[in-house]
Each structure stands twice: as C-alpha cells, then as structure tokens.
Amino acid sequence: GMLPSETTLAEYLKEEGYATSIVGKWHLGHREPFLPTNQGFDSWLGIPYHMSGGSLDQHICNFDDDETMWLPLYNGTEILEQPVNVEDLAQRYASES
C-alpha cells in the first residue's frame, strides 16, 4: 500500500479548507492504515482493489485458499457488504457522487 507518510492531493486540499471524497476503487492498500480515509479523504465509498482481487460471484480468487476473501464494499473504514453486489454498484457510485 501507499505509505501513510506520503502526502496525497486530498491532504493538500484539506489544508486549504476543502472537503474531499472518493468514490470507486482504491488500489493503494486494503488494510486500515492505507485506506483513503486515513490518507486525507473525508469520505469513501468503494472497493479496496480490483474485481479479480477477491472472491466474487462464484469466482474464487487464486489467493483465497479457504474461500473467505470475498470482495468488500466500504463506506469509510466500515464494510457495508461482503461480497459486494456488483449488479447495482455503478448506480450506487453515481448516487454517491
């Protein structure tokens, strides 16, 4: 993941008084210290890695030896659902934006 010591555009904008949000895939670290809300973003709705990086819809990821690594949908640092329902994901992203 991206080191917490790296400065993101969101952190620069926050210094100038802006609120920041991210909607969609965050592929810069999936553990809590690396999530967008710990990298300067005020809010985030999205998945932490690409669709084939976790098990989803009868597809078991190659790294998922015990079939428990279901792709999550996050709101901030909380998992809203796991596995994510991809059928309405685009609409949810659009509504959040």
Image (spheres, grey):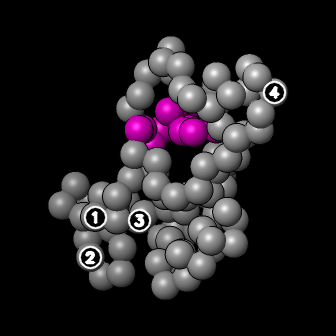
Residue position marked by numbered label 4 in the rendering: 17
Q: Nearer the viewer, mark 2 or mark 4?
A: 4
User: Is mark 1 in CB contact (under 8 Å) with mark 4?
Assistant: no
Which disc number belongs to residue 88? none
Answer left or right for 92 relative to 42: left
Q: Amino acid at mark 4?
A: Gly
User: Is mark 2 in CB contact (under 8 Å) with mark 1?
Assistant: yes
Task: Estimate the spatial distance between the alpha carbons at disc 2 and disc 4, rounded to whole Å.
Answer: 43 Å
- Counting residues from the N terminus, which is met first, the one under dot 2 or under dot 4? 4
Q: Amino acid at mark 2?
A: His
Q: Amino acid at mark 3?
A: Trp
User: Is mark 3 in CB contact (under 8 Å) with mark 4?
Assistant: no
- Counting residues from the N terminus, which is met first, the one under dot 3 or under dot 1? 1
- Counting residues from the N terminus, which is met first, the one under dot 2 or under dot 1? 1
Q: Position of residue 79 (x, y in %)?
A: 61, 57
Callout 4 environment at 10 Å: few (<14), some (14 to 19), or many (20+)?
few
- Find numbered disc 2 in the image and state the secondary structure of the residue it sits on: loop
Q: Nearer the viewer, mark 3 or mark 1?
A: 1
Question: What residue is at 60 percent from the left and 68 percent from the top?
Answer: 93
Residue position marked by numbered label 3 in the rendering: 70
- Find numbered disc 4 in the image and state the secondary structure of the residue it sits on: loop
Residue position marked by numbered label 2 in the rendering: 59
Magenta-drawn segment = 28-39
- Counting residues from the N terminus, which is met first, the one under dot 3 or under dot 2? 2
Answer left or right for 75 relative to 68: right
Task: Estimate the spatial distance between the alpha carbons at disc 3 and disc 4, rounded to whole Å.
Answer: 37 Å
Task: Estimate the spatial distance between the alpha carbons at disc 1 and disc 4, rounded to whole Å.
Answer: 37 Å
Residue position marked by numbered label 1 in the rendering: 52
Question: What residue is at 70 percent from the left and 41 percent from the top?
Answer: 20
